[in-house]
Image (tube, rainbow, N blue to C red):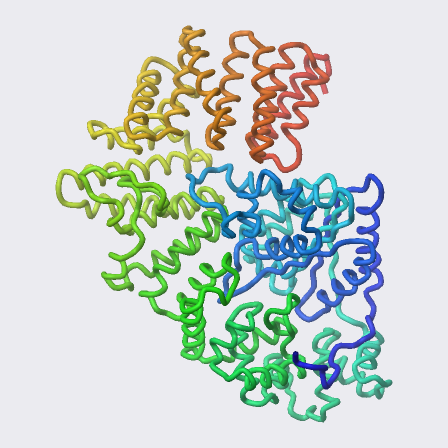
Amino acid sequence: MLGPVETRSVSPVFVGRTGELDTLHDALARASATGGEPQALLLGGEAGVGKTRLVEEFAAAGRRGAVVALGGCVEIGGDGLPFAPFSTALRALRRRLPDELAGAARGQEEELARLLPELGDSGVPGGGGRPDEEDMARLFELTARLLERVAADRAVVLVLEDLHWADASTRHLIAYLFRTLRTGRLVVLATYRSDDIHRRHPLRPLLAELDRLRTVRRLQLGRFTRDEAGRQIAGILAREPDPLQIDEIFARSDGNAFFVEELAVAAHEGSRTGLTDSLRDLLLVRVEALPESAQRVARIVAEGGSTVEHRLLAAVAGLGEDDLIEALRAAVNAHILLPAPDGDGYRFRHSLVREAVGDDLLPGERSRLNRRYAEALDADPTLVPAADRVLRLASHWYHAHDPAKALPAVLDASVEARRRHAYSEQLRLLERAMELWDAAPDDVRAGLRPVDRAEVHPLPRPERREGPPGGRDPATTPPRYLDLMAEAAVAGRLCGERERAMKITKRALRLLEGEPEAGADAAGRDSRRAAWFWTQRSLLVQAQGRGDGWRELGIAQELVRGLPPSEVHAEVLAMAANWSMLHSPGPGAVTAAERAVEYARMVGAEEIELNARLTLGGLMVDAGHIEAGLAEMFRVREVVVAQPRSAVVARSHVNLSSSLEGVGRSEDALGILREGIELTRRMGLLESEAWVWGNIADSLVSLGRWDEAVEAADRAGAPGRGPAPRGDAALQRAVVGLARGERT
């Protein structure tokens, strides 16, 4: 549409990088070979050094024998969209291999739709359900298996660019894949900007972790030598440059490929005297040479994110179609902007230029552009992909500094992040909501989407319509500040930000102590809310190794004592009973478990009821009521097998098998455990599967089947498992070694 370019700033000659390119081709050859294994590579280098050009060269050569899928981390308003590179890459695979991808995802479409919404019937990620620690692990496991299946019969290259912009969920998924991919003709290549990785950059711990994996190769692109810079300049100018010109450009660019291009073009166009040694001036000089309309469009694109769709750009720019095309033509011909790979929008040719243009915006200009983006998305939701709209809208309203619009948009985005199991991004969004809370008008807070429970719990699930104590209609009950804190505490615990979650729970408890609601019913609600936060503190204390969590559970029990049955009350009792089963079983634990079952039934909390019944059954077995206790646990198992529930499925099989093992029924335990392996694997419950394998090893040791026990322990402690099951697996191997007389 925009026609051929008028000048050439990118050298048609690929310069240098022979060693790095050989390494990439070797990785592809290893993966493509019969019986080959997945290959993982990290490609780092400073901004402008030529990472993208190397990837393009590798991908062009690789297409002869492989399917190449590219995905990039998307930065918008300083935020990264959850799982953006994986969504883009999977979408490319779906276009290239529609039948293969559909077959690989069969049976898990709803869960995988969190990464690729097109797999779901509704076109949006599956929602609902109470979040738990297994949700993200299940999504990661299913993603790994999907990629292995797609790459089973053909070479697939998955390129993930710009990890320095990656959201936390993307970083976690990359770490998981690099640790666990074991089959398939797959190459995963991730790039990042090394000069952005300062001491506190969130990517630094991931790089350190991946460096310790023997299966990961890390490449670092250096700057060009003088000879390489000379060949690059010759390609740009289509002639041999003057040696003095090479010396000057090389000295000023210091061998950075992008700066070589900019300086060579500037010299060719006769504007050398207008350049300064300032990097910002160097990056902006050619932008400022554009017509005013093209400069305006460039500023709009700079604030719109890594890529801006054409229709969205047209809506924000407010130019006539012909004027917009002419402005875009000027920016593209000057190599400032490029059409997006899918042909539906525009991006800066280099992110450094985008950053320079963005930094040159005035504060009021930046907020005004964000407002126009947000208003355009509000007016026409079809301007961007449905899966991205809510998150992008929240970012634009937030950076427009409009609390009345930003607060509901940020809350909607937090729900979307939770649906995708992107708990780190959910936590960041909820913290923004808490920041905006007091600044938003009262009528905006009152009109927010309602909570669906009287108890503190994550934000609304519209399908739930439980009536709260006191007869209030939940459909008219807006969320309170404490509800945001509760949601943030859960998100922080699930994403591993336990210290932040602990601070939030402490603040919430201080608020509850200092500002109780009026009236008896309100006081009861405050007690239940406080009890809920104390249960979270118990979990966090245990996870951080700061105690056993019993003090916190004791306070929660006191807070709900004497109150009418509620879900919080049932959960407190169930947690206390389970703690006692593990640490101090006895009559008091049995009583707590029985009351938890009773209360959970009264309020319709089925998952809490099932967990409490498992605890009750285990306590009955410990107390000598073996057959009655086992019968109760078998009944729970039957419910779970008929209607698999991720929060109960593993515990039903692990606890039941442990009780069977404890009474000497090792063969029966093995049968239950093999069923547990099938269920946890089908549901992608990686951590739970590890615990099941650990119990299998335990029963096999009891039966004297030592070789099989070691094999099961190895499966329990396989790469990608958590530290606890890995430690248990090491103990099982040691037990077998001692039984065999191996003392070292």
Q: Residue furthest left?
A: 519
From this viewpoint, is residue 146 visible? Answer: yes
Residue at x 48% of width, y 22% of height: 652
Q: Give percent across and percent down for residue 653.
A: 52, 21
Q: Is residue 67 left or right of residue 377?
A: right
Q: Give percent across and percent down for residue 16.
A: 83, 68
Where the C terminus falls, by quadrant?
top right
Q: Is residue 680 left or right of residue 418?
A: right
Number of dots carrying numbers: 0
Looking at the image, residue 620 lies above or below residue 422: above
Q: Residue furthest right?
A: 240
Q: Give percent across and percent down for residue 618.
A: 43, 16
**Of residues 621 and 230, the one drawn nearer to the viewer in this rendering:** 621
Q: Is residue 660 left or right of residue 564?
A: right
Looking at the image, residue 260 lies above or below residue 423: below
Q: Is residue 588 left or right of residue 716?
A: left
Residue at x 50% of width, y 51% of height: 124
Looking at the image, residue 132 lies above or below residue 693: below
Residue at x 86% of width, y 85% of height: 240
From this viewpoint, is residue 579 visible? Answer: no
Looking at the image, residue 92 lies above or below residue 566: below
**Of residues 562 and 92, the one drawn nearer to the viewer in this rendering:** 92
Where the N terminus falls, by quadrant?
bottom right
**Of residues 500 and 140, the one drawn nearer to the viewer in this rendering:** 140
Q: Give percent across and percent down for residue 214.
A: 74, 43
